[in-house]
Amino acid sequence: MARRVALVTGASRGIGRAIAVELARRGHVVAVNYRKRDEEARSTVASIRSNGGEAEAFKADVSKPDEVDRMFESIEATLGSVDILVNNAGWGLISPLTQMTHELWERHLKVNLGGAYLCTRRALPGMLGKGWGRIINVSSVAGIQGLAGLVAYSTAKAGLIGFTKALAQELRGSGVTVNAIAPGFVRTDMGVSFFKFFGEDPDQWASRETLTGKLVEPEEVARVVSFLASDSASNITGQVFIIDSGLSIAGGGLYRFASRLQELGK
């Protein structure tokens, strides 16, 4: 596999960290983006380097154009232009729409959707110049099914899917592919925190509500991303890959979960 420069946004922990580690394991040099978790970002970089990989941390709020521009300038000066962009940075808050402020609504859109737009717009010229690039957007099953109590988050993640499909068409024949993944509940701090609110064991819940009987592991998500970032996926574009243990087709488990989210938000 050719050595390429990969930028993973929101890579200090969780799914982003797993993706960064996996891409480094595959031989890519990884730009680890983060907003405020300095220690965790350094830990991600240290983990990659301890296994012989190459990585640097770059602090930036991807919802802010000036910070995105400065981050790309720093990456290009340090590592080279970005070949693989994983738009993973995201944010969500449980709240009924009637109680959501305009500021919170805007934040959902700016972080989850605006960040992907800003980073993609900045990365594309270099990719198009090389005739090769990979853009992978991290959406969610919430963006496909919609979840009560997470209207703003669902809206932003659904927007990422439209962004993926439209951009893939716009980049026809360019050598740049655009795909999305839509994880369900993943064994990360954020994913498990939902179950803590309910006072329920996540593994017992998964055994009851999913088709595989297991929560998705972050490393499983990372391997799908790694494949989409490879030369082997050169004819895959404009697609959405659901990684949710079969939850979204498992007979109402997702809607039961959404109902409990809605109760929490009241």
Image (cartoon, rainbow, N blue to C red):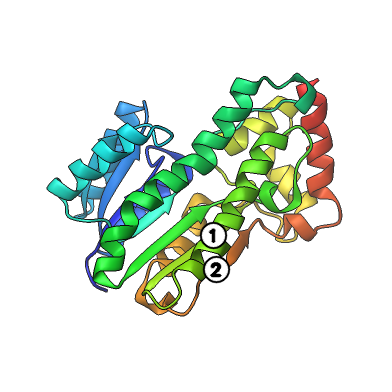
Q: Label 1 sits on what residue type?
A: Thr
Q: Are the residues tagged 1 and 2 within 8 Å (C-beta)?
A: yes
Q: Quadrant of the C terminus?
A: top right
- The mark total stands at 2
Q: Is residue 89 something that shows in the picture?
A: no
The residue lying at 65 percent from left, 56 percent from top is 244
The residue singled out by tag 2 in the image is: 238
Q: Quadrant of the N terminus?
A: bottom left
**In 3D space, how far apart are the residues under numbered discs 1 and 2 (Cα atoms)?**
6 Å
The residue lying at 71 percent from left, 56 percent from top is 213
Q: Is residue 183 something that shows in the picture?
A: yes
**Number of residues whose C-alpha sits closer than 10 Å to that of mark 2, classed few (under 14), some (14–19) or many (20 or more):** some
Q: Is residue 151 toward the left or the right of residue 29 in the image?
A: right
Question: Who comes first in sequence, dot 1 or dot 2?
Answer: 1
The residue singled out by tag 1 in the image is: 164
The picture places residue 78, in percent across and down from the top left corner, at: 13, 47
Q: Which quarter of the figure has residue 80?
A: bottom left
From the viewer's perspective, is residue 152 above or below residue 118? above
Q: Label 2 sits on what residue type?
A: Gly
Secondary-structure class at tag 1: helix
- In the image shown, does 44 or 82 lie closer to the viewer? 82
Secondary-structure class at tag 2: loop
From the viewer's perspective, is residue 34 above or below residue 146? above
Residue 123, disc: none
The picture places residue 52, in percent across and down from the top left corner, at: 19, 55
**Number of residues whose C-alpha sits closer than 10 Å to that of mark 1, classed few (under 14), some (14–19) or many (20 or more):** many
Instruction: Kindly give the residue lying farthest to the front in the view shown.
Output: 170
